[in-house]
Amino acid sequence: MEKFSHAGAAGMYRHKWWAMAGVGLGVLMGTLDISIVNISLPTLERELNTHFATIQWVVVAYILVLTSLMLGAARMGDIIGPKKVYLTGLTIFTLGSLLCGAAPGVEWLIGFRVFQGLGAAMTQAVGVAIITMVFPPQERGRALGIIGGIIAFGLAAGPAMGGLIIGLAGWRWVFLVNIPVGFIASFVIWKHVPALKAGQAGQRFDIAGALLLLVTLVCYALAMTMGQRMGFASPAVLGLLAAAVLGLFLFIFLETHVHQPMIDLTIFRDSLFSMNLLMSFLAFIMNGGVLILPFFLELVMGYSTEKAGLFMMVGPVSMGLVSTWAGTLSDRHGSRLISLLGVLALVGGCVAVSTLHAGVSALGYILRIAPIGIGMGLFQAPNNSAVMGRAPKNRLGVASGLLNLSRTMGNSTGFPLMGAL
């Protein structure tokens, strides 16, 4: 593996907690944004005088851009350095939040969400790479566990914060609240985090590969989105899935025939690296099924939106309680056993959730959902640490992007599949 091209490790590690603060704020902002915007959709539909078929694109457009551009942004991080990409992403996301808050109509809001999604793709693509670089290997699991805890907090607090913000200040502040957080995170990263330039000089960005992957991921994400409404057997959805498969094969062919590919496919020859990525994807497919629980709580159990939101906090809170602890344990004892325990808890939780029924008690619901959160908390940080530990130093950005892509694609696959079942 190649060595970092910036200052020595000792000097780099001195900035680790500043980097954690900056990246953590960015992660929190992005996580809160997703959960807050989701809960604000009924208000946006009413205030902007539109209907659900249109307003859903406030979320769909953001997710499409985030998913399809993440690996391209990750590769750019390997070429010019993750700090530059992260700062650029924070700037775009913060500016996009300002524009969304000032949007005069729904079409403008959707367009500004596309711009905001570009910034989110850049920050999410390289955030894990920055943490991996600035923390010593023996503390990597703990650091990634802290990031997992921040994500869990954002998922748990988002719905309540969204309702509070909308009630006190109106829907525009759902977006405007990101601005001070974005400024603080940008200042911390700019002021206190070193350049973090990794890899060889003179690398080029694979534009053709990036465009082909963009089309492939957009087709797949659209197929998952449209499949929920039209059914996965509909010609349009099948056509999109076929286009995604064709695009993937063409991408693999292209990447094996260019001098500087966007993704060096030899990285997948490491069986542990590939297996851990696959496990991440499968884990988030299972976790994605949790996204249908609000419908169960409101339509089957008859809970109010507020009460359903409180019960939806069970999973993220459970995850947050064990995430940092699991990462620390993986630093001491290795990631394999901790990750395996997480997968077992996650599978057990999914089996338990399948037994939910209209007469289940509140305690019965909690006992079925908590293992899913605990499982994700036990699994995610050790598994992420294992992936980043196996990645070549000049490909940490791409490895970080692949990890985040496995999460977004797993969730976007799990939700429609569980809904169809």
Image (tube, rainbow, N blue to C red):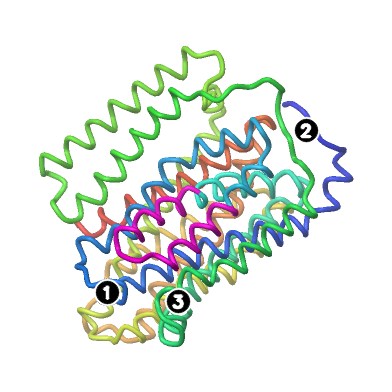
Q: In the rendered view of the protein, which quadrant contains the N terminus?
A: top right
Frontmost residue, 395 versus 124: 124
Q: Is residue 240 above or below residue 146?
A: above
Please tell me whether the stretch drawn in magenta is mainly helix, strand or loop: helix
Residue at 89 percent of width and 45 percent of height:
10
Q: Which residue is mark 1?
A: 356
SS class, disc 3 = loop
Q: Residue at x 46, y 57 (%)?
A: 344
Which amino acid type is marked by label 2? Phe
- The image shows residue 15 at horizontal and vertical percentages of 82, 53
Q: x, y percentage for residue 85?
A: 62, 43
Tell me which residue sits at (35%, 81%) in the image: 364
Q: Secondary structure at mark 1?
A: loop
Residue drawn 59% across the image and 54% down it: 90
Magenta stretch: includes residue 154: no
How far is mark 1 from mark 2, CA to CA?
51 Å
**x and y percentages locating residue 91 in the rendered image:** 59, 53
Mark 2: which secondary structure?
loop
Determine contact: label 1, label 2, CB under 8 Å: no
Q: Which residues make up the magenta segment?
A: 90-118
Disc nearer the start of the sequence (1/3): 3
Instruction: Answer yes or no: is residue 142 visible.
Output: no
Quadrant occupied by the C terminus: bottom left
Q: Is residue 364 visible?
A: yes
Q: Which mark lies nearer to you, 1 or 2? A: 2
Amino acid bearing label 3: Met
How many residues crowd around disc 2 within 10 Å: few (fewer than 14), some, or many (20 or more)? some
Foreground disc of the pair 1, 3: 3
Circle 2 residue = 4
Identified by mark 1, the residue type is Leu
Residue designated by label 3: 313
Q: Earlier in the sequence, mark 1 or mark 2?
A: 2
